[in-house]
Image: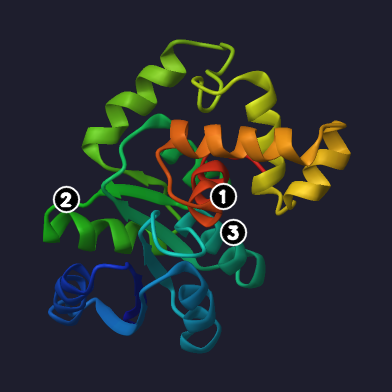
Amino acid sequence: MTIRVVVADDHPVFRSGLRTLVEDSDLLKYAGEAAGGAEAVEVCRTAEPDVVLMDIRMPGVSGIDATRQILAARPEVGVLVLTMLEDDTSVFAAMRAGARGYLLKGAGPDEIVRAIVAVHRGELIVGAAMATRVMAFFRAGPRTPAPAFPSLSPREHDVLHLIAAGCGNAEIARRLALSEKTVRNNVSAIFTKLQVADRPAAIIRARDAGLG
């Protein structure tokens, strides 16, 4: 039995390379592709993959949110994150969302195929580059996790949390007992500190960090 694989990545060249990798393997079958998180959720509804190769940063719905939605509908699917992000926040956000594996995009073809097979078997896979960091995290023992986006003030953090929850400025103002002008100023400061251009990008960053 071959393993049905869906590829979700917003870079066409990278998707093409992964398609070639899958099609060249006797163990795998290419079941479909998506250029964004929302599309990945839709493709998985019809393609019924065994494993999804999932990027994290994609337009619209992030890979983290897409993973949650896919697994809510089909918990047996194995999600293998394949990304350029190697920070602790991204790794643990992916695992909390239900991903069974996390590889960096520099991984070789053989490593990716082995990871797909392992994830399909129900194993938890973390690439060598990330394994050292994960082990160091647990060796350090219980600790207070570093707050997401430490450059934000407590008020800005509260505003970002509500932005990630889908609240508009008027709703944020009501919940935090602020004026809408104050909320707008906070939103503008958040965009600057997170280096994002708009609300959807801020939501992706916030949800990837577990907010909302």
Task: Where is residue 12? Give x, y as percent.
Answer: 22, 74
Q: Which label is found at residue 68?
A: 3
- Type of the residue with mark 2: Ala
Residue labelled with disc 2: 107
Residue 200 x %, y %: 53, 56
> What is the residue that sits farthest to the front in this orientation?
181
Front in this rendered view, residue 113 or 59 = 59
Depth order, front residue of 212/81: 212
Q: Quadrant of residue 113?
A: bottom left
Task: Give the number of the disc on residue 203.
Answer: 1
**The C terminus appears in which quarter of the rendering?**
top right
Where residue 100 is drawn, which disc sits there? Answer: none
Q: Dots 1 and 3: beta carbons under 8 Å?
A: no
Q: Residue 180 at what x, y percent from top left? A: 77, 41
Residue in the picture at 30% in, 32% down? 131
In the rendered structure, the answer to whether residue 187 lies left or right of residue 111 reads: right
Q: Is residue 186 left or right of residue 16?
A: right
Dot 2: within a 10 Å radius of its alpha carbon, few (fewer than 14), some, or many (20 or more) residues? some
Mark 3 vs mark 2, CA separation in Å:
24 Å
Which residue type carries mark 3?
Arg
Going by the numbered disc 1, the residue's amino acid type is: Ile
